[in-house]
Image (cartoon, rainbow, N blue to C red):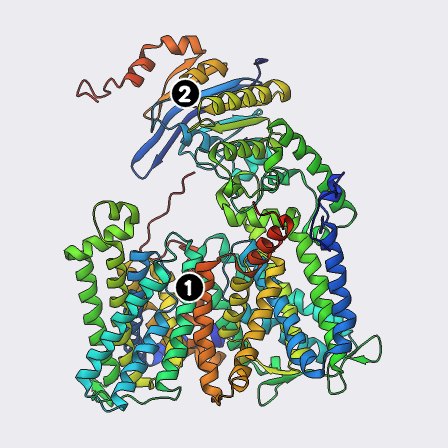
Amino acid sequence: MLYREVGQFRTSYAADQAIFPIRQDRFGMLALLLVAYIAVPLMANEYWLSTIFVPFFVFSLAALGLNILTGYAGQLSLGTGGFMAVGAFTAYKLATAFPGLNIVLVFVAAGIVTALVGLLFGIPSLRIKGFYLAVATLAAQFFLIWLFVKVAWFQNYSPSGVITAPPRAVFGHFFVTGPEALPAYKYWFTLTFAAVLALAAKNMVRGATGRKWMAIRDMDIAAEIIGIRPLSTKLLAFAVSSFYIGIAGALWAFIYTASVEALAFDIDRSFQILFMIIIGGLGSILGSFLGAAFIILLPIFLNNLPDQLGLHVGVALVTNLQDIIYGALIVSFLIAEPNGLAALWRIGKEKLRLWPFPH
Amino acid sequence: MHILYAILIGPFVTMAREPAFLIEVLIGGLLAGVMYSLVALGFVLIYKASGVFNYAQGTMVLFAALTFVGMLEAGLPVLLSLVAVIAVMIVLAFAVERMVLRPLVNQSEIILFMSTLGISYFLVGLGQILWGGDVHPLDIGIPSGPLTVHGILINQLDLYAAIVAGTLVAALALFFQKTRVGRALRAVADDHQAAMSVGIPLKQIWVFIWAIAGLVALAAGIMWGASLGVQFSLELVALKALPVLILGGFTSIPGAIVGGLIVGATEKLGEVFWGPVIGSGVEDWFAYILALIFLLFRPQGLFGERIIQRV
Amino acid sequence: MHSNGGVLLKVEGIALAFGGVKALADVSFDIRKGEVRAIIGPNGAGKSSMLNVINGFYRPHAGSITYKGRTVRHMRPHQAAKAGIARTFQNIALFKGMTTLDNIMTGRLLKMRGNFLLDALYVGPARREETAHRAVVEQIIDFLEIQAIRKVPVGRLPYGLQKRVELGRALAAEPDLLLLDEPMAGMNFEEKEDMSRFILDVNEEFGTTIALIEHDMGVVMDISSRIVVLDYGRKIADGTPDEVRRDQAVIDAYLGVAHDGGKGA
């Protein structure tokens, strides 16, 4: 099937405003969803489902959240890990305090609480901008992690500081957390969160909300002069972003790792998510997914590469090599394509549209 | 009510009851603060000269200290190791200019900042591959016992570190204000294009300033390494220079100095007097929250001027 | 140019200083409904500062602004926007990462009632509202003849087109008062002709009151109903193009006669 839009005329503004105006994209998305929901769980083994796909969706959600704040609204944040921790520990407290509460509601509530915390730490964005704000978000990062480590109430007084997800099921008996949970259920559960929230994010950024965010990002003074309230717009970005990140944190703690300590959300986690959106593409929904996939697959690739080549390399060396390769990749990406993988994808599509007639 | 008393009033009562102890804590904090000032100065110099918010400054501290310790452990004499590390930091400055700054010239500040995150990861990986990831003890022959002056205990190592750092800070501040090279640097900081048009070689300036920042990092790395051991956490300690920067402003040398002292003193006070009430490890975040609250009231920092926005 | 006489905006005794530098001193003038009012003067005369005071970006140190009968010292920029004041900028202030269409759509934001939750769902009201505003924006795009660049990020557009998109964004707000800061700066003759035509069409077709700063005297004399002349932050003349053309103070200011008693300029 050729990627052409010749002959597809959009005859109404509504059609032109559709999420995928080009027919091939619509079919592509439908096929992708079918593959994701049916083919993958049928074909992939447990390892792939639990250690690649589930974290992929969790990371994608966190990257989406950060991309809303940094990529769309232009507010650089280094506090992603801290906000993920808020989501994780809120979900834990809620799930253990109200055992009867539906797990989906627990996660949504965790997202809402994280959004409120994000609002609080977003308040300085009225007065400070750019790197000053980035450093201010570090305050959130360090303070929140300290809080969850030191205040034993958050961990229900667990002596190790580790929280373990209680077993919970959706639709009565499909366990998504706890020892009886099946990898396929976990997979469908996280996939659904990622798909629904990605759709919502796409709708927001292509609508009035997204235009406000981007206006603030591109030129805050001009935005104010056309009537956009800078504070409420930025705070909304902080809240929505934190909602996504909080849910990602809850999914991480409950579905992906099943038990977790606050230090899993330290500053390195923040940077990891930031790298995803740099490599994937700032201000791109698709880029959040591509970046997450890249950052998850890279270490797996690097871990397996020496074996494939018949070399025996220590674990420590591989970890350090990863750091070096991350670092070098980030710099090279910024030099070669500051707009990330998403831009490469778009350029590829444009080329395909004209193929075989280069201009 | 009880908890409010413990947080809002109790610590001050303790301070008033034991003034000698308070002074002891304050002095310890100020001495630590001089080190923060030094690292913050490294940030400020790079930000002024190249507009880069150099997140890798903290990693440079770790990398320099690791390299120094590595050479000592390999059996090199102290002086030779020192010269060798200085050479390494200068090579690093050249590499950064050639491979990162030059290709990214005219990119937005956020892109440049992210590139320094890349540099940071690269250096962490490289340092540990070369010298291993364990904690390396570092003994540079400074006596480490406490010194008693009028009944007040002062850590000798902290004292020496503060003296070295203070000297470096003063030397850099003077250099920047008084010399011809310093003037050129300030011109670059004001306006890159204009500086280039009057014949100031921008690229050499960048290499120079990154080399200076490397040396600052080395000094800080050695001093901190001597007291804490050379290890990963040095990077996080060096990051404390960030709240110093928001207190003092990214472009102000006096701001970096005073901000460093304030952060050093207050976080020590926070740890010693509030730590028992709200939990230890307050040092991890105290400076950040302090800087944040400060910014709400004075967004331009300690010494910054009010910015007039134009459209 | 059908000024019907009613005063839309009146500034009185406006003073503004940056540090010790006086940008405006005791400036008073009015803008009548439906007219094209020009503000002219040499570089540094305080023209842009005056626009910034009117739309609330600068807070004057003295004086008052009466807009639609209400007198205030200062309006916040978003209040001014809400009250129907839109503007363009000397150094184009577009949102560079967004397309032409999205830029102009931002001009409709004040008229949109949705919220982020409706946006996220993109159901019912959000979809209808988006489509309705899109239709208005498309009329502006047609009017300004920029259909071909609808989906191009404005950062990639040439200067003249960017100026046009910026005018489009201001028009999208359906303002009562449109402030234009050097709308024709850096344009060639044809582009200026086009822009003049757009400005006059806006004034005549929509009845929008316009205040503009412009350096090209030919254009100013052609399209404006009345002109206020600033020099060194003071008003030195105010009147119809013919009156201003003959005013000795204006001629002196433009020919650079010294202000401080003959030391020369």
Quadrant of residue B150 within the rendered picture: bottom left
Circle 2 SS class? loop
The answer to whether residue C242 is above or below residue C196 is above
Quadrant of residue A177 within the rendered picture: bottom right
Location of residue A238 in the rendering, given as x and y in whole percent from the top left corner = 58, 59
User: Label 2 lies in what chain?
Assistant: C
Relative horizontal placement of residue A212, taking residue B224 as reference (left or right): right
Question: Mark 1 is on which residue type?
Answer: Ser
Residue at 38% in and 24% down: C26
| Extreme residue toward the right, this view | A172
In this rendered view, identify the residue nearer to me: A329 or C63: A329
Q: Kindly identify which numbered label has been placed on residue B115.
A: 1
The answer to whether residue B4 is visible is no
In this rendered view, identify the residue nearer to me: A135 or B81: B81
Location of residue C219 in the rendering, given as x and y in whole percent from the top left corner = 45, 17
The answer to whether residue A318 is visible is yes
Label 2 sits on residue: C216
User: Label 1 lies in what chain?
Assistant: B
Residue at 56% in and 26% down: C177
At label 2, counting other C-alpha atoms closer than 10 Å, the crowd grade (few under 14, some 14-19, many 20 or more) is: few
Residue at 73% in and 59% down: A29
Question: Mark 2 is on which residue type?
Answer: Asp
Quarter of the image where the C terminus of chain C is located: top left
